[in-house]
Structures are given as C-alpha cells and as structure tokens.
Amino acid sequence: MIEGKETLSGGAVLRYGMVGGGAGSFIGEVHRKAVAFDNTARLVAGCFSRNFQNTLATGASLGVAGERLYRDYEEMAAGEAARRDGIDFVVIVTPNHAHYGAAKAFLTRGVHVVCDKPLTFTVAEAEELGQLARERNLLFGVTYTYSGYPLVKQAREMIRRGDIGAIRVVMGEYPQDWLATPAEAAGNKQAAWRTDPRYAGISNCVGDIGSHIEHTVSYITGLRIQSLCANLQSFGPDRALDDNGEVLVRYAGGASGVYWCSQIAVGHDNGLKVRIFGTKGSIEWEQENPNYLKVALLGQPVQILSRGCGYLYPPAARLARIPSGHPEGYYEAFANLYAAFGAALTKHRAGLALTEDDLDFPTAAAGIDGVKFINCCVESSQRGSVWVELDS
Amino acid sequence: MIEGKETLSGGAVLRYGMVGGGAGSFIGEVHRKAVAFDNTARLVAGCFSRNFQNTLATGASLGVAGERLYRDYEEMAAGEAARRDGIDFVVIVTPNHAHYGAAKAFLTRGVHVVCDKPLTFTVAEAEELGQLARERNLLFGVTYTYSGYPLVKQAREMIRRGDIGAIRVVMGEYPQDWLATPAEAAGNKQAAWRTDPRYAGISNCVGDIGSHIEHTVSYITGLRIQSLCANLQSFGPDRALDDNGEVLVRYAGGASGVYWCSQIAVGHDNGLKVRIFGTKGSIEWEQENPNYLKVALLGQPVQILSRGCGYLYPPAARLARIPSGHPEGYYEAFANLYAAFGAALTKHRAGLALTEDDLDFPTAAAGIDGVKFINCCVESSQRGSVWVELDS
Amino acid sequence: MIEGKETLSGGAVLRYGMVGGGAGSFIGEVHRKAVAFDNTARLVAGCFSRNFQNTLATGASLGVAGERLYRDYEEMAAGEAARRDGIDFVVIVTPNHAHYGAAKAFLTRGVHVVCDKPLTFTVAEAEELGQLARERNLLFGVTYTYSGYPLVKQAREMIRRGDIGAIRVVMGEYPQDWLATPAEAAGNKQAAWRTDPRYAGISNCVGDIGSHIEHTVSYITGLRIQSLCANLQSFGPDRALDDNGEVLVRYAGGASGVYWCSQIAVGHDNGLKVRIFGTKGSIEWEQENPNYLKVALLGQPVQILSRGCGYLYPPAARLARIPSGHPEGYYEAFANLYAAFGAALTKHRAGLALTEDDLDFPTAAAGIDGVKFINCCVESSQRGSVWVELDS
Amino acid sequence: MIEGKETLSGGAVLRYGMVGGGAGSFIGEVHRKAVAFDNTARLVAGCFSRNFQNTLATGASLGVAGERLYRDYEEMAAGEAARRDGIDFVVIVTPNHAHYGAAKAFLTRGVHVVCDKPLTFTVAEAEELGQLARERNLLFGVTYTYSGYPLVKQAREMIRRGDIGAIRVVMGEYPQDWLATPAEAAGNKQAAWRTDPRYAGISNCVGDIGSHIEHTVSYITGLRIQSLCANLQSFGPDRALDDNGEVLVRYAGGASGVYWCSQIAVGHDNGLKVRIFGTKGSIEWEQENPNYLKVALLGQPVQILSRGCGYLYPPAARLARIPSGHPEGYYEAFANLYAAFGAALTKHRAGLALTEDDLDFPTAAAGIDGVKFINCCVESSQRGSVWVELDS
C-alpha cells in the first residue's frame, strides 16, 4: 500500500491514469471500457498523446479534470505521485518504444503499472522493470489479452490437473491478413508504427502477435521454451520488419511445438489458435470462437465445452458473467485481466499478502519471457534460422 | 423534451433509473453494463426489488443515493418526476407481470421508458402503453437484444436492398435446454417465475424466447405475420406453461415459415438461429456465433461475412467497435440498443425531430407485435393447433 | 427361394436386372455402382428406358447380353422368370409413376424386388405390393438411402438402448436449391419429371425429399406419426406441384416434431438433417457431413462421434470399411443397403429364416409408410393445412 | 503398347494383377474397390502375400484363377509377362520394403506399374525405377490418394490461373492419433510394420503421412522445396522411428511453409489439411471434409466452394459423379487416380502420345520427390534439425 494516499470513499473503486490511447488510437478505448466493465477503476488522469492538444481533447471527452492532463509521462508520474488523491495505477498503451520509459517513470515514483505488450525492446529493459517492481513492492500487469478468456483458464486448469497427461506437442498459430497489402503506405496509423522499427522494435509480426502465441501457450501449459529455430519473412514491399514467422520450438522436458504468426494470411482476421497434445488427450481453443473449448480424450468422442456450463472447473466457471450460449468476447477477456489486477491491488493496498491465485494475470515475468522470445526469434532468423537457446 | 428538467453539465450523459434488477436477478446487471458500455447514461435511481432491503443493498453497491431508492415503482415514478434532476428514462427489468404497471406509471408522469420483453400480458395493455407514449411524445424502447447485433443489421440491410430477392421461406429456431429438467423445483429463481403464470403470463417458452424469433425475423425481413398455427407442449412434469413450441407461419405477401422454440432441447445453450430464403439468395445468422453471417447467392459459393470487414453495409459497419476477428458478444448487442436509444433521446431532448434511422431500436410497436404473437400462439394451440389470424 | 433356379458357381454373387437407369438418368448408375461396391450382385438383364435404343446402348456399355435387353418391364419379367439363370432380383429406378406396375410385374412372377422411393402413387398400390411380396415370400427393398449411413445406425441404436431417454421433440429438415429457378423449363430432365404430376404423382418436394425425412426419422426413432398438419407451397412459376413444405407432426406417445423440405432454399445442396431430443440427451446428424454424429447428454459437453472409432455400437461399427477420418459417402450408404439386401436374399435362397437383424434395410412397410406420409401431407395442405390422421 | 499382347474384347477394360493386399491387409481392398469403381480394370492375377496359403485363399475369394496365383513377385512378373492374356499393369500394395523389388521385377518385364507410396527406401532406388519406366516406355503411377479429390484439383487449377496470386506461405498438417499408445505392441499389424525399420524404412510418420503433405502441396501449388529443417520425434516408448515431425520449408522462389505430421495427436483421425496463402487470396482444404474448399480473396467474404457446383473449374467439375451435397469420399479419390491411369494406359496401348493432361496422376517423378523429402527430413533431424538442401 502506498503510504499517505487518500482512499476513495468506501474504497470501492481504484483510480487510474492512462499513458497513450488518445484520439486515433485503437487499443486505448478497449482498455478504458475493460476497466469500466466491472467498475474496476475510475480514470482520473492522462497523457493520452505526445500531442498535448490531443491529450486535452481526449481528456475532456472522458471527463478527466484539466489539471490532471499532462504533457508527458514524466510530468504525469511526478504530478500524480505528489497528489494525495493520485492514481493507484497507470495503464500504458503507447506504441512499444515508450513502454520502458513510461513504466520506469511510474515505478520509480511508486505507482503500480499495467503495460501493453510487448513489454520493452530489450530483455535487459524488461528485467529492469521487473526488478524495479519487486524492489518497490509494486504490482505490474502486462495485458496479454487472451489469458483473460474463461476457456483458456479451463484449458490451463485441465492441464494442471493432468486431464490430458504429459504434454508432447504444441501447435500455436495466429494468422491475420491486415498487412497482406502495404497498409502502412495507405495511411493506416496502426500499420505505420507497427512496421517501423523506431516504434515497434526489432520485430513487427512476432512482436505483435507471435508473442501472444508464446504467452497463451505458456499460460495454458506452464511449459518453458528451451530453444527455438525461427524463419521470419517480410513479404510486404519495402517492409523493414517481419510480417510472417514460422518457429520450431523445443520445451524443457522434451515436448516440441510449432508457432506460426502471420499478418499476410489472406482470409484470417484474428485467428489465434492453440492446440495442446498430451499423452492422454488434447485441447484446442480458437480466439474467434472463444466461448468453446474442444477436448479429446484417448478413445473417446471429441467434446465441445461451452462457457457457462456446470461442468467447467472453478477458474473458468467463476468468470462466466452470463449463461452459456450468450457470447462473451474480447472486451470481457480484457475486463477479466483488469478485474484480477484490481482485486489484487485492492488486497495489496489493504496490506494483505497476495497468493499465486491472486496473481492470476500476466505479470512482469510474462512480459520478460515475451521479450526474450521475440529477441530469440529475430536472432535465430538473422543467423540463418539456426537453433537458439532462450535462456542463454 | 421534458420541460423544466435540469440537464447534466455538458449534456453528455443521460440519467436513468431501474425497476427490477436487484440482487439475485440476472438481466438487471446486463442492462446496467450495457448502458455503461458506451457511457450512454448514469444510474441515479432505483426500485430494484419488491423487497426494499434488497433495493437498499443493491442501490448502495451501485452508488445510488439513498434518497433515490424507492419502495415501489409508483413511488419512484412520482419521486423522480418531481425532481429537477430526475431521471431521463427508466429501465424496467422485472418479471413480465410488472411491466405494464411500471411502464404506465412512468409514462403517465412523462418519463421515457425502456422495458424488457415480452412487453405485457395482453395486447390491450401493450397497445395502451404504445398509445400513452405517442400521446405524451415519449420514447419507448423494448429490449429485444438480438436486433442489436451488427450482423443482424447487415442482414436487414441486405434484404432492404434486395440482395436476396423476394422472400419465400423463413426458418427461425431458438433451442435451449435449461428447463429439460424441472429446474423450477430445484431452486432456480429464473425457472420459478418463468414457469409460473402469475409472473410470466400465459406462456413461458414462446413468451420468453419464441418472441425473440418473432422480433428478429420481423426486424430483418420486415415481413408481417398474417396467420399462424402453433403446437405448444409442456414436457416438464407439472409445468403449467409451455416449454416447447412449434409454429407454422404465413406472412402477408405469400412467404411461409416455421418457428421453433424450446427450453428442453438438450445440447443447446441459447441457439437462436434465423434463416431467410429469397428468390435470389439466402441469409443465415446464429446468435452463438454472432460475428459471422452466412450468405448464399444463386449459383455462387456460400459466403461468410465477418463483423468489422470493409464490405459490410453502413448500418452494420458503423457498429464494429473493434477489428474483425476480435469477438463482440451479447453485451455489445445490448449496448448497441441503448446507444441508439440514448442518441435518439438526446436528440429528442434537444427538440429535434427523430427520423426512422434514429429509431433503429425496438419500439412499442415491436412490443405490441410480440404480445400479439404470443397470444396468437397460445390461442391457436389451445384450440387444437388451428390457424389463427394475427390481426383478427 | 425360387424353385428350379440355377445358382451361380459357389453361390457367391447374385444376379440382378434393372428397370430404368438408361443413358441420361442419374440414379441408375448410382445403384449399379452400389451393387458392385461389395460385389453384391452382377447385372445380367435390363430394360433401361422406354426407348429401346437407349436400352440397347446402355446394355451394351454395361456388358449385358443382348438377349436379356427388353422392350418393357412386362417382357423382362416374363423373360427372366422363364430362364434357369434368371435374375434373382430386379432394381426399379424409373420415375415414380412406373414403380407400381414394374414391381407388380416382377413380384407376380416370383422375382425379388428393390424399388426406389416413393414406392407408389397411392397407399392402396403400396399396400398391394407389400401384400404380394408377403404372399409370394419375396424380399422387397425400398432404397431410402440415408438409413444406410453408419452414423444413422449409431443414432438408432443409441435410442433403442435409451441413451437419450424418451423422445420429446424431433426436428427434420431437407433443404435443397436446385429448383429455386424454373430448371424444368431449362432442359433439366430430372426437374422436368419431378415437377410433372404424370411422372411424380401428387407431390414433388414432399415426395422426393420430405419422404426421406419421414423415413430417416422413423428409422432412427421408431416413432409412429399419428397426425400431421402440412403447409405446402409451390414457389416456382407455373409449377403444378409443391417445391417447399412445412409440416407439424404429432407422434403416438406424445412427442412432437417439425419437418421442413425445400427445393428452393438457396445455398443448400442436399441438407438432410435430423435432430432428436430426448429426456436425457439429443442426437444430431447431417447428411452432408455424414461421418460424424453430434450427441449431447444432459449436463455434459457436446460430443462428436466419428465413424470408425472404437466406441461406436456394433450396428455402426461393423459398417466402417476404412478407418475413421477417411470419408465414406453416398455410394457407401447405398452399398450398405444392397449388401444387407443381398445377404438377406442369399440366406433366404438357402431356405433359412430371416431375423429382424437380417432385415435391416427399408422394406415394403417403410415404402407404405412413405406413401401414407406424402398423401397425408398433400391432403392436409389442400384442406387448408388442417390436422390429418395418418392411419385414418 | 505392349507388343504381342492379346486385347480384351472391345478393349473396354484393362487386366491387372496385385502384389500384396492379402487377407489382413487394409489398403489392398481399397485399391481393388477403387479399380472396380469405374470398371477401370479386372483383377486376373495376384501374389497377395508372402504366405502362399493367404494368396490362394485371397485369390479364390476374389475369383482369380488358380494358375495366376503366384508364390512371389518375381514368379508373377515372369509368368504374366509370358502370357498372351497377361496383365496390363500391376498394383503394388505391400509394405514399403518390397516396393522397389516388385516394381523393378515388373518394369523389367514390360509391365506397367502402380505402386503405393512411399515409393522406395532410397532416392537412388526411386530414380532407378523412374529411369526404367522411361526407358521401357511404361506408365508408372504412385498412389498419393489425396490428389484424386475433386476439390484438390480445383485448388490446383485456381493457383495455375493465378486466382490467389503468387504464393507466399504454405501450411500443411496431417495429424492422426492411432499411435498415441503403443499399438504395435498390442497386435495391430499396421502399427507393427510401420514402426519397424525393416518394413517401413528410415521413417514411420514422415514416410507414411508427411509424404502426403509433401505431395498434396506440391500437386496443388507446383512449388519446389529448396531446403528444409526438420524436428522429428519418437514419443512412443521403445519406438525406433518417428511418430511426430515438424518441418520448416523454404521453396524455390521465396515462399516458406510449415509441415506437421503426427500419429500421436489425440483427437485427430486423419486430419490432412493444406492452406495456401498468396498475394491475392488463400485456399484451404481438409481431407475429412473433402467436398468443400474454403477460398478467401483479398477484401471479400470467405467463400465455401462445394463439389458438384457449376462454378468449379473443369478439372474439378468433370470429377463430380453425383450432385453437390451428396458426399463423395476416399474411395472416389482413389478411383479417380485409377480412372486417370487407366485412361492414359488405354491411350498408350493404342499407340497415342500422352499429353500432360493425360498424366494427371502421380507418376514416378512424384514418387522420387517423396523419397527425397523423407530422406531429407530424417537427415536434417539426425544432424540436429539443421537446414538441408533437397536437391543437394
């Protein structure tokens, strides 16, 4: 708990600020809606853009007081840390290049952080943020959306319980097609920064969506990648970064896998799909049909599990807001992450110790793993698609 | 516009109150989240339960001021109408039996109304509410959720434009299985009131979900039911009302159709599905997979349209909050209804005339049609499943 | 057993002849391939067309001796009955109008019969054929293709064993779109005779495909239709017979159902689909994806059963020719009917009594039920879609 | 044309013999049914097993004359080559180890050959067979089943016409689960020889099913593999050969791909699936649902093409035996290969030159490519999953 901070009346709702997410951005509004979904926190401060006019306009439209709209994240971190009613946590939703600086600015001033992925450009930066959070006893969340889906939690719990036995093979894929044409040259702002090394870092496709495969698999299975062999391509004309990547993976313990991410796979919108094969069964989950989980057990008919049904394990069951057959989607997955983060923060503020269950959201450790994965893929590919150890 | 009412600062957000939706109810929280989703309105008053303690507790948890928590809807209608900062509209989410009385109480005091379906027990009651709203120049919304889905709007627009030609045949179905066993005897509160004529009216299954088929088809196609022949059953032991219904339909203009609704169809969660067959093509939409629309044109491959893609018509395109492949669901459909209602109300309050496009949400007319349909089905079935004219 | 007939060396293979199926027909070649699939019988005689030149040409191409090519079915029945190496059974695949006469011609001369459906124009004719077969101790098969599919047999066996409890509701549908346009006026031979009462009888759509729903449901469930209410339409311009039909069904014992058949349902090729809902579970089978069966048991995940897997019941398991995942289709379903008929005939010829299991193919009784169903639907619809008893 | 051979009366049907396919084998009967499906050829000779008693019994049950049942393939090749009514071609369906010897025995005696895949153990052997066939002017077919499916031919034709532009990425997978448990130790004859290097060669999984991915992709796309990096595993206890393989592929011209084959992927029966992504569109085909093809073109809704529909290109259209919606399957795919082979052979026997279209079945060249692929995968994996050139 941050000393000297004023608590909200009743302590019911947390206060948060946002860095990034001004007019013209996509993901900022998703985060705001997700935080609001369960009344997890109230937006009270922001630096929504490098353009202060944008910040002012966005802030006004969102009902943020003018005095809490800032020109840059340093000013915001300093300003909020100094207020008795300062924000409890900051949400960082800028392009990748600003994650490290912004997160560090708030952590060093004692503000809890939720940051978008990929966490940083380098592993050292990510580890530094993790170290800072640990030292300052601050919560650090990384918004790997897809681990917020109830059926993903069901998959994780089934594997924890041994329902499908020891894992042998993993297939992860994430095809999209929004960069099949040179959208970055056609005025698409998202495409522009994601394909620009200055804002995206050393990878576009693996960084943006390959990292989601890595996290979702890791979250579900608990497997550690030992080494990988990546073949990254850039099919778009004059594109500096990858827009397609194929990766062979070896996990500690002997399982193997394949990850494929693509932004040029015509016909696919947002096709994250994970398949886990064990000695006794298998699990398959698709993000575009997220309320169902395909499960096969040796010698039995394939089963389709449905969100909200009574046979689900508690970690999945408790996340169903509405009955089975009433579709929940992307916002709810995001909201689940924020609800978990908010509950943990509330408990933390009350001085209580957090259990592993309390921390059922992606933390700095997941963020660090993601950066390692991205860097490893790029290194492997650049060296001729050779095998590279992840923790070398 | 209600004379003498105080407007919110900036006029940005409307104020609303809720009747029903106390602790233990399901749909109340869905409505509240849907209203909040786009910041359409702020909850400031309520009579959440016939049990005042429940109202007080619910109100407190929702941050409603104690002075605006009421013992019954009459008191609430009177109290709110008298305040300068009174609610702009009320949301009625009680069991069916209270819809008529509550809606009337607010309409007669000049408060706009959003009411759950089925609107009333009798056609006369429904028509009276419609008449009252017209006379008082009040907006009246009925929350037929499924017309809020973007792909449903795409289907409607395609038919309006003649893409599938003149409609010949309609297939509507809505299978569920939550009443396959006597859940009402096992403590399920939803099951208890829905199977009890005192609270549900003359129909359970047709009233609850058959009416959704009727509205969704009507909304998409614009077809008017001329006559119908219904075979309703009650399979649950000692169940007073129907839990399964099969209906042959004849539309004005010569098209025909079949509606099937069931609460005992084991294996189905919430399977609303509508198929429309025209001279030149067909359209198929399923609620459990709501982000996609199956379209077939004569002699061409079947097509799968995806929410968020550029080829959608404007009424569907403008409702995509997030890119294609990022699933939206039930809450967003509800939120779309409230956003449309809120926008219309804001315009109405500003004294502007509302166009047909402004009224793209189910109104009292839809509510009246629904009650007619339910009553016709029950009459037909009770008379031996004979054909009954809808507007006789 | 036919006295005095010569048996084939080893008795391994039966001899058959065919009425209909000349050049230009569709289904004749399907029957021939199906009979050949398991070497069930050898084609040795034929009257393939009313046009003798067609018969001669077809016969020559099929290797049938010229002396066994006949001008009409009477001549063929007489000729074959007189030969010591005469055919064991005849396959009748003409348009509907000739079924009765041809079948009678062979039955009266002691030749076993396999006849396409619908069996005859009138119930009296169908019953007469059944009576003749009984009196002469002849086998009579009716080629309702779809009961030949292994997963249909699995469904039947599950219901026999009570796996889904007592049946409450049945949904059967069979949408096609090949008559969405006036194909009969565009030179389509199939369309021409099926829409012509002289060749098709009193119904086109119900007769051709509605009867498949009726049989498939009856075969799977064992339910008897008590009464029905049918609404038949003819959407094609100047079409004398129905091309779409919607039927409410009441079964003996209290279950209810809906059958929908259509030839104008744009986007559907051959969409026979049957869903059976019982007190404890449900079963769903689709002809276009015939190697899988969807099964739902109360409170459990939906299951997908796959042809060839070890968990299937014996009646389905023994029909898998190739491992699961290797698709079998329409020909194999047909071949299964002929294999069953051939095995029964071989046993019958050997003078052995046939058990119910031996007769696991559609017999005259099924053919009679089909004609009753068709006639009832037409009567109901013509009288204003009133309820008609099937066995009145 | 083979000099001095007697032709069948009318020349309508070819004569063939079979090596392998005795009682207890699986694929032999599939080949026989496929050859018979279109009356392509008549079985007149055989050496069905290394066990002569099995050959005699199998031959008798198939109606093959005793004098044409042989103790080994050398005897058979010599015997048949010496007869004026000798076989036109031989079908070799033994385990892999005997392919080379048997094929060579017949080729050297001037008999056309159809051989199962993988063609041989070594590339040199495969090339020798190809060389022999060329020198002797003999037809050589290799039964890669899946290129016989109509929708696979549609995919190939679409790519040839440029419908999806230049190919960028290929995803091929073939998951099965029949070796998830040690079936070879449980008396499964198929499992026993496939996991035994003496009969299977240097690979089990890649050899058996990985090679099907390789061929199907190659057939559809025309792409040549330049190099690959394979990670093969053996998860079954004490299994000498691979049962799972993951392969990164680089094609000449710059496209890349991933192949995954597995026999331990619980929940999959026979899941060959190929996805091709081009600059303008994509194509997806699944063997378990083989009558449909998913096609996506840039910026348009995904399309589902159905076998038998009028919009298909001629190479696919002409293979539809029955109307769309009537499922064809595995046997028909096989039969299509034999029909093409038989037609080519008939033309060849008539002394006519064969065009590329006549040779639309997998030939020795495809067989050689398959053996190269298998050997490359094993070499890559054994050397630590490094990149290996295919044509080094």
Image: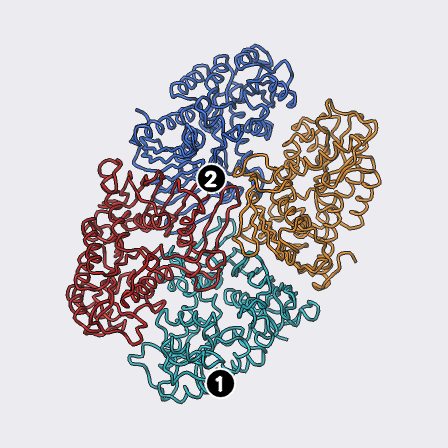
Chain colours: A red, B cyan, C orange, D blue
Residue where numbered disc 1 is placed: B105
| Foreground of the two, C316 or C269 | C316
Mark identifier at residue D271: 2
Residue B285 visible, this orientation: no
Q: Position of residue C71 (x, y in %)?
A: 76, 33
Left or right of residue A307: residue C168:
right
User: For numbered disc 1, what is the local secondary structure?
Assistant: helix
Q: Position of residue C118 (x, y in %)?
A: 71, 47
| Foreground of the two, C126 or B226 | C126
Q: Eyeballing the image, is B228 above or below C80?
A: below
Identify the amino acid type marked 2.
Gly
Left or right of residue A60: residue C243:
right
Q: Chain of mark 2?
A: D
Q: Chain of mark 1?
A: B
User: For numbered disc 2, what is the local secondary structure?
Assistant: loop
10 Å crowding of disc 1: few (<14), some (14-19), many (20+): some
Left or right of residue B112: residue C46:
right
- Residue at 65% x, 20% y is D60
Identify the amino acid type marked 1.
Ala
Q: Position of residue D274 (x, y in %)?
A: 42, 39
Residue B291 visible, this orientation: yes
| Foreground of the two, A254 or A294 | A254
Q: Eyeballing the image, is C367 above or below D139?
A: below
- Residue at 22% x, 60% y is A137
Q: Eyeballing the image, is B36 above or below C168?
A: below
| Foreground of the two, D128 or D346 | D128
